[in-house]
Amino acid sequence: MTTSQFDAYNTTHDAEIEAQLCAYNCAFDELGLRFRWDARTLAQLAAIDGEEARIAAYIEAHHAHLLKAYSVGFLSRVILERKNARYPACLPTRVDNARHPSHADHLAHQSQMSSRRERVSYEAELPALAGV
């Protein structure tokens, strides 16, 4: 991959990550859920095949208290429906690093972008789900 191809890939990839994060975080906001994803969270979940399964795994790992009132299937479906209404594209499952010789450079760049994004707060006071 040449430097210009790599830069174009980074720009496109960063824009895709931002679009995915915006769509997910807007869906969470619309549903009154008190969590936000950042680039690091999205990257960690990318190893799981399928968006609904990624959402379910996140809820089970980080917000299991919601499962007292709602099934994980219901929550993941409603979140995905809201996310897809805003941005229907699916972020692909993480590919093997061996397929991309300059993947380490890309990860370093992504880490820098993540750090910068994490400094910006997207937190807002949102109402809790009823019954939780």
Image (cartoon, helix red, strand yellow):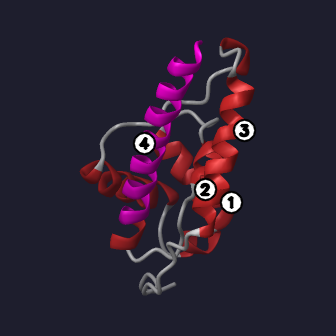
State the mark number for residue 37: none
User: Which residue has dot 3 on it?
Assistant: 108
Q: Residues within 10 Å of mark 4 (few under 14, many from 20)?
A: few
Q: Residue visible at 52% across and 77% down? A: 123
Report the span colored magenta: 1-27
| Marks 2 and 3, the one that precedes in the sequence | 2
Q: Circles 2 and 1: CB distance less than 8 Å?
A: yes
- Whether 20 is among the magenta residues is yes
Q: Is residue 50 above or below residue 87?
A: above
User: Which residue has dot 1 on it?
Assistant: 61
Which dot, 2 or 4, sits closer to the camera?
A: 4
* Secondary structure mostly seen in the magenta stretch: helix
Left or right placement of residue 88 versus residue 1 in this view? left
Separation (CA) of disc 3 from disc 1 = 27 Å
| Marks 3 and 4, the one that precedes in the sequence | 4
Which dot, 1 or 4, sits closer to the camera?
A: 4
User: Which residue has dot 2 on it?
Assistant: 58
Q: Is residue 130 above or below residue 6?
A: below
* The N terminus - image quarter: top right
